[in-house]
Every structure is written in structure tokens, then in C-alpha cells.
Image (cartoon, rainbow, N blue to C red):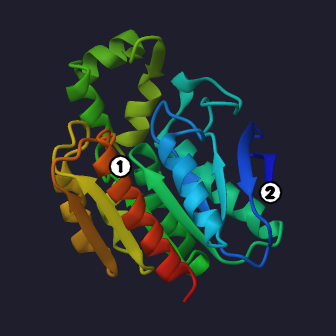
Amino acid sequence: MQEKIYFENSKGDKLCGILSSSNKENPLIILSHGFASSKESSTNIELEKVLNENNISTFRFDFYGHGESEGKFENITISEGVDEVLNCVKFLKEKGYKKLGLVGGSFGGIVSILAASKLGNGIYLLVLKCPVSNHMEELITKGYRISPEKWKEKGFLEYQKNLRLNYSFYEDSVNIDGYKAAESINIPTLIVHGDKDEAVPVEQSKKVSKIIKDCKLEIIEGANHRFSEEKDFNKMIKLISEFIIKNIKK
């Protein structure tokens, strides 16, 4: 059964999610999307399908300024995303779900790393798909060929074709250390990354996988950031779903 549900971040903004669940006794996986994506991403939809077929509930939601959630994209920050995942966990536990896991891709990856470091044993597993692990501000400035000084001077950068991203994102991101946060993660963790990722260097995942105590790294040869080739996408879904099914039911 699918249900559209709204919850709030700490500022009171209304966030939208889709709860797919038949039983509160089932484990539940929170699916966090990437930058400028949404809860309707192909990864989220496919994982929802596979996990639900294996009696695992899912909750996929839109970050602030994305999809059906309130707010402007230009005001999003990593810290805002972390706050929203933490509020999401609290909200679902209050609804009676006890056994939770996190899945995060790209931007949702760094958010999930930071959230997991704060939640400790409050969640049962962590899955990261081509995650940003550190210095997202550097990836953006290099990708969009803009210096921090120019970004600050202008106040925003043009992100993709029709979006703006405020300098506040840079100010927030430069103070975030995903590698440091990873040191406190003790739950079973899987990282899936393509070795041809053009957006997030696979070296970040190689490094963070050595920091997280119980971590498995799967590198898909030839896969890009979006796993756009069907065989790469299918392999990514298979690796993630099998890991979740094995570890969430322990």
C-alpha cells in the first residue's frame, strides 16, 4: 500500500514522501535522492519495487526545495539535508517503525553519512550509491568552473539549466568533513560506485570505505555517475537490494 505523507524539517517546512508499507513490523528503508533529483528517481522507484516484494517497507521523500516539498532549491545545504533525514527517522519511529536503514545517492550519500554518524545504532544499515563523501563544494566549483570568490561575489551560481544555488551552500559544505563523520559509523555499510563516474571521484568511496568499520565497497567497471547503461543500473540495484535483504533481516 502506498501513501503520500508529509512531515516537517526543524524549520517547519513541509516535506513530501511516499510510504510504501503493508506492516509496521516490517523493516523500513529510507531512500534519499541526489542533487536536483527527487523521490521519483529511477533508483528509488526500482528499489521500492524490489524491496517491497521482499516484505521490506520503503519511504522515499523529497529534500527541501525538491519535488513536492516546500522551499527553493537555491537555499538547500548539506546541513539542511541531514536535518531532514534525522527528522524523517524520528517521524517514522513515532509512527511505529522500529527497524530502519538508510540509502543515499550522491548528495543523498554525504547527507546519509552524516546522519548515520549521529544516529549510531538507531539505524541498522547504510547504503551509499556513488556518494559524495567530502568537499562537495569543490566538486561543484570544478564542475561549473567558478571560483569560490566569484560564487561569493555573485551570491549564487547557475546550476544546470534553470536553477540557482546560493553561496550559503559553499559556506556550509566547506565546514563539513564526511571522512571524520564516517569514523563513528559502526553499522553494516555498502558503497556502490562506478569507476567512470564523471561527477564524484571513485577515490572518495575508496577512502571512506576504509574508514567505516563494517563496510563493503563494490566498484562497477565502466559505470558512470548515473549508471545510465542498463547493465550497470541493473547490477547496482541487485547489489543494493541483496545487501539490504541480507542485513536488515538479521
For the point 35% across and 49% down, the residue is: 233
Give the residue type at disc 1: Phe
Res. 10 in view:
no
Q: Residue at the location (31% across, 44% down)?
A: 227
Tell me where residue 249 sits by quadrant. Answer: bottom right
Q: In 3D space, how far apart are the residues under numbered discs 2 and 1 (Cα atoms)?
A: 26 Å
Circle 2 — which element?
A: loop
- Report the residue at 68% width, 56% height from top: 88
In the rendered view, does 37 fall on the left or right side of 180? right
Mark 2 vs 1, N-terminal side:
2
Are the residues tagged 2 and 1 within 8 Å (C-beta)? no
Q: Which mark is residue 233?
A: 1
Q: Position of residue 33 (x, y in %)?
A: 51, 44
Can you say which quadrant of the picture contains the C terminus? bottom right
Q: Residue at the bottom extreme?
A: 250
Tell me where residue 209 sits by quadrant.
bottom left
Q: Is residue 207 left or right of residue 215?
A: left
In the image, is residue 82 above or below residue 69? Answer: below
Packing grade of label 1 (10 A; few <14, some 14-19, many >=20) is some
Figure quadrant of the N terminus: bottom right
Residue closer to the observer: 72 or 30: 30
Instruction: Pick whichever, 231 or 62, lies toward us.
Output: 231
Residue placed under numbered mark 2 in the picture: 1
| Along the line of sight, the residue nearer the viewer: 227 or 104 | 227
Q: Residue at x 42, y 15 (%)?
A: 155
* Horizontal arrangement in the rendering, residue 97 relative to residue 45 (left or right): right
Three-letter amino acid code of the residue under disc 2: Met
Residue 30 visible: yes
